[in-house]
């Protein structure tokens, strides 16, 4: 008998979308299993005929893909399509189906990883894994040691009812600083700055774990090297 797995895991491993996106597609009735609308939590195997958004899912082994993308501001990090929005999948135009690992809000720019490896995406995205992400931020007022100390110590964000973890903050310009986070609360840096009386003007992610943005032109991507990939896997 064919081994069965949850449908969202199956789709992520086939490079169709993330598990979260798979659940959304199932909920919207866009996934069929053997001609019948899929249900949340359903188990499937490679013997099943699975159709996502009108396209049959191949049962062939997927060639692993991991790319580093320099996302411009104005691009949304989702595989979904919304009127008036341009998503990162359409921007990259990769020849096979890939999806973003995690999010970078629409107004922000910089590094985002895209893959067809579901388990890798889940491991990098897990908040409990405390993986480092580094950002360059410019704000509307002079960066002071008092401001940096507040950011470093962590704070309570009322709107999220959550506490930020202590982090590394370094002044790099009159109105610019670098920040290294090990968590990914919704619009965390913008909310932290606002809680200190500052407004973020530009926000760019320059590193995820050992993968650096480097000199990738905005709107372009590069393949993650074998050495980078091996180090990434080792650190997960």
Image (tube, helix red, strand yellow):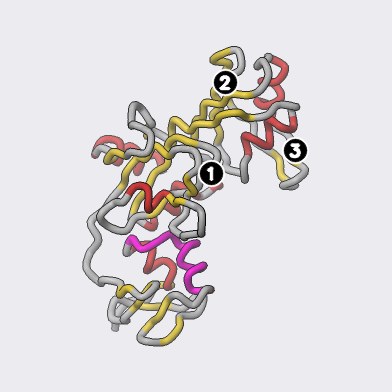
- Residue, far bottom: 35
Q: Earlier in the sequence, mark 2 or mark 3?
A: 3
Residue 71 % position (x, y) = 42, 39
| Residue at the spot 58% in from the left edge and 24% down from the top edge | 138
Height in image: 49 above or below 199? below
Crowding around mark 1 (Cα neighbors within 10 Å: few <14, some 14 to 19, many 20+) is some
Q: What residue do we see at 59% from left, 22% from top?
A: 169
Front position in the image: 2 or 78: 78
Whether residue 19 appears in magenta in the rendering, the answer is: yes
List x then y, in percent, for residue 16.
36, 63
| Range drawn in magenta | 15-26
Along the line of sight, which residue is nearer the eye, 136 or 61?
Answer: 136
Residue at which label 1 appears = 106
- In the displayed image of the protein, which residue is found farthest to the right? 158
Secondary element under disc 2, as helix, strand or loop, is strand
Q: Is residue 132 visible?
A: no
Q: Report the side of 234 relative to 122 (left or right).
A: left
State the mark number for residue 177. Answer: 2
Give above or below for 227 relative to 96.
Answer: above
For residue 151, say whether it is visible.
yes
Give the Cα separation between the discs numbered 2 and 1.
20 Å
> Closer to the N terminus: mark 3 or mark 1?
1
- Which sits in the foreground, 217 or 11? 217
Between marks 2 and 3, how big is the CA–CA gap? 21 Å
Q: Residue furthest front?
A: 84
Q: Of circles 2 and 1, which is in front?
A: 1
Label drawn at residue 156? 3
């Amino acid at each position: 008998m064919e081994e069965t797995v949850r449908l969202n895991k199956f789709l992520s491993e086939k490079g169709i979308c993330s598990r979260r996106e798979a659940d959304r597609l199932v909920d919207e009735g866009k996934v069929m299993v053997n001609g019948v609308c899929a249900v949340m939590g359903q188990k499937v195997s490679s013997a099943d005929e699975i159709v996502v958004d009108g396209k049959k899912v191949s049962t062939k082994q997927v060639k692993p893909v991991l790319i580093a993308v320099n996302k411009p501001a104005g691009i949304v990090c989702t595989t979904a399509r919304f009127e008036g929005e341009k998503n990162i999948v359409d921007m990259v135009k990769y020849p096979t189906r890939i999806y973003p690992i995690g999010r970078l809000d629409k107004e922000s720019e910089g590094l985002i990883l895209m893959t067809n490896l579901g388990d890798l995406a889940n491991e990098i995205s897990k908040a409990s894994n405390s993986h480092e992400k580094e950002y360059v931020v410019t704000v509307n007022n002079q960066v002071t040691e008092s401001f940096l100390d507040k950011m470093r110590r962590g704070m309570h964000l009322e709107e999220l009812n959550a506490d930020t973890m202590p982090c590394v903050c370094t002044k790099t310009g009159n109105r610019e600083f670098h920040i290294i986070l090990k968590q990914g609360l919704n619009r965390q840096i913008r909310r932290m700055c606002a809680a200190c009386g500052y407004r973020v003007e530009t926000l760019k992610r320059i590193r995820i774990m050992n993968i650096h943005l480097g000199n990738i032109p905005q709107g372009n991507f590069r393949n993650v090297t074998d050495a980078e990939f091996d180090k990434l896997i080792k650190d997960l």
